[in-house]
Image (tube, rainbow, N blue to C red):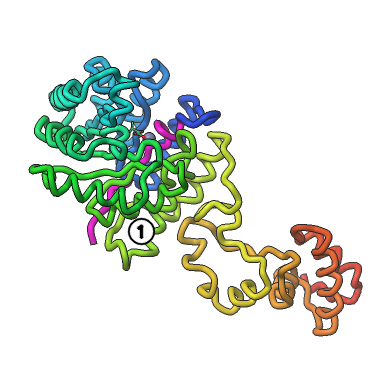
Amino acid sequence: MEKVEIYDTTLRDGEQSPGCSLNDDEKMRIALQLERLRVDVIEAGFPASSPDDFKAVAAIADAVKSSTVTGLARCLKSDIDAAWRALKNTENPRVHVFIATSPIHMADKLHMTPADVLDCAAQSVGYAKRFFPQVEFSAEDATRSDPAFLAKVVTAAIDAGATVINLPDTVGYDTPREYADMFTYIRESVPNADHVRFSCHCHDDLGMATANTLASLQAGVRQVECTMNGVGERAGNVALEEIGVALHVRRDTYKTFTRLKLDEIKRTSDLVSRLMNSPVPKNKAVVGANAFAHEAGIHQDGVLKNRATYEIMSPSLIGLDTGRLVLGKHSGRHAFRMRAADLGVQLSEEQVDQSFKAFKKMADEKKEISDKDLLSLFAHAGKTKITH
Ligand code: KIV
Ligand code: ZN
């Protein structure tokens, strides 16, 4: 079993999503919760981007002790200097420098030749290394870059002192096989590849961020960049909770572990959702309100007999007290009787028959039946004995 490092970028890439900006106090609360969740690295912001971001990164760097705190910097001396001023007091100072390597980004965004980009990447990593023992280098838009050129840039960054190489799928374009093959190619063609940790960073434009991330782990990647609830630019980043739980539930396949405290996931998800004003969809994997809810009668009957019939993990794994049996028009008698008992109502078989019919009629009219609805239904039946 090999360790996979979890690098959380909720406070940097996540905060870049429209409408999700946070004030300093909110950033600090999220950072402290991420530390409780035991992520390995917290990317707290982009210190050169604004005085507020600088202040927030510096404050988080001072407060967080058991996760590494890092900040983003372009390949510019002034960005790296700002990152150093913000991060110099952390236990294990680490900076994340990046430059784009795809033809479209180099020509149309940076107006730089490939030779300039190669030189700039090497110079900047070398400069960052004068201050920071840990330097992560990212080749932005790696998945749309020429592989041979990418290998040259990665080789130069490692020679200049990079300790982590991140190859992002910046625009969420790759398929899982392509993303894994890119890492295999780079690891095989860069002479000093075994000196560094490789990192993935996936966006979800085609809904493939989780699949791409997991595929890259099978190609030797050992750091995952992710955000809570998958917040981030456009369709977002890969969701931390999906990777953390997938690596745990399917450790038979991935043969890796993380240091995450998985039962802090739900609390972290709720906090991020609330402070970023970004509701989690009901059917969101792992943390959605329906992720452990069952409505269909056959499913409810199975779960009441043995949860594992329809649940591959227990709600307590992510810090949820219990799953939910949702009573609706697909529910069966077994769940109905159990909910009555939970509510302190004992029903004879005859009473179950009678009130279950009334319940089905009500369920045809309402999407979800609440406990209050049920109690009024039992009261109307008038034949039940309330035990407490
Ligand atoms: O998506 C991306 O390429 C990024 C880089 C800055 C790492 O967020
Ligand atoms: Zn990104």
Q: Quadrant of residue 189?
A: top left
Kind of element beneath mark 1: helix
Q: Is residue 304 above or below residue 87?
A: below
Q: Residue at x 86, y 70 (%)?
A: 358
Q: Residue at x 53, y 57 (%)?
A: 320
Is residue 163 visible in the rendered image? The answer is: no
Q: Is residue 323 left or right of residue 340?
A: left
Q: Position of residue 210 (x, y in %)?
A: 40, 51
Residue range of the region highlighted in magenta in the rendering: 1-15
Q: Which residue is more in the foreground, 30 or 194?
A: 194
Residue neighbourhood size for the residue with mark 1, other residues' Cα within 10 Å, grouped as few (<14), some (14–19), many (≥20)? many
Q: Residue 149: within the magenta?
A: no
Q: Where is mark 1, residue-wise?
A: 247
User: Residue placed at 74% from the left, 59% from the top?
Assistant: 368
Quadrant where the image shows the N terminus? bottom left
Residue type pointed to by label 1: Leu
Residue 11 on the magenta span: yes
- Nearer to the camera, 297 or 117: 117
Q: Residue furthest bottom?
A: 349
